[in-house]
Image (tube, grey):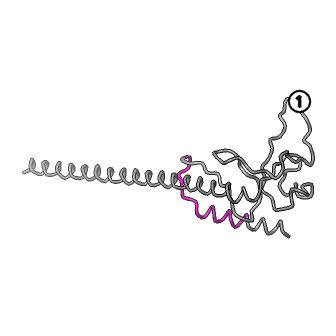
Amino acid sequence: MQHKAILVKVAIAGLIAVGSATTALAGDVGVAVNVSVPGVYGQISIGGGVPAPELLMARPTVVVPAPVVVGVPPPEPLYLHVPPGHERHWAQHCREYNACNRPVYFVSDHWYHDVYTPHHMMHHEEERREMERRHEDHERHVEHEIEHDRHVEHEREHEHEHDHEHEHDRDH
């Protein structure tokens, strides 16, 4: 039942994120959405200026070790924010995160809410502003082209009228 409630929260948060996204031109901007909402759990993206995570355990937890294949590197560890207690009973919960055969580091709830979420909110706000600025620049460019086309068309019409006046003068 708790898993269903988490999925509902994730769906609602996703809809909010999609609904607030700024329209961008195809090929102009790539966007990755990482929802950082209280009560939403899952994988944490480490890097990109995010301060080092505060871990609940110093070593990664692995329920089912991945098979060793020569020439294939072992799976990268995941950093997860999970509900309190899931890390202690990870074998019962790893399937919910598709992480039974991956090394997993668990980040503290405190770090997730006080460090990670504010950092991502600020970072996504900067991305949103940049997308908005690009969109506004594009709109100005399109308006300029439209105005230029109107001016060129007006000049053609004026030249055409002027040519007709000269033809009329020759005929009389």
Closer to the camera in the image, 144 or 76: 76
Residue 44 appears at what percent x and percent y?
A: 73, 52
Count up the numbered dots: 1
Instruction: Classify 131 as above or below 1.
Output: above
Residue at horizontal 88 percent and vertical 30 percent from the top: 70
Q: Amino acid at mark 1?
A: Val
Asked if residue 132 lies left or right of residue 50, the reply is left
Residue at horizontal 9 percent and vertical 50 percent from the top: 169
Magenta stretch: includes residue 23: yes
Residue 22 appears at what percent x and percent y?
A: 54, 58
Residue at horizontal 66 percent and vertical 65 percent from the top: 15
Asked if residue 32 lies left or right of residue 1, the reply is left
Magenta stretch: includes residue 14: yes
Q: Which residue is mark 1?
A: 70
Crowd rating for badge 1 (residues with CA inside 10 Å; few <14, some 14–19, many 20+)? few
Magenta region: 10-27
Quadrant of res 9: bottom right
- Which of the image's four quarters has the N terminus? bottom right
Residue 61 appears at what percent x and percent y?
A: 88, 48
Instruction: Classify 156 as above or below 10.
Output: above
Quadrant of res 41: bottom right
Closer to the camera in the image, 162 or 154: 154
Closer to the camera in the image, 63 or 150: 63
Closer to the camera in the image, 100 or 62: 62
Residue at horizontal 81 percent and vertical 44 percent from the top: 77
Residue 86 appears at what percent x and percent y?
A: 86, 59
Spot the residue most to the top.
Answer: 71
The secondary element bearing badge 1 is classed as loop
Instruction: Classify 147 as above or below 73.
Output: below
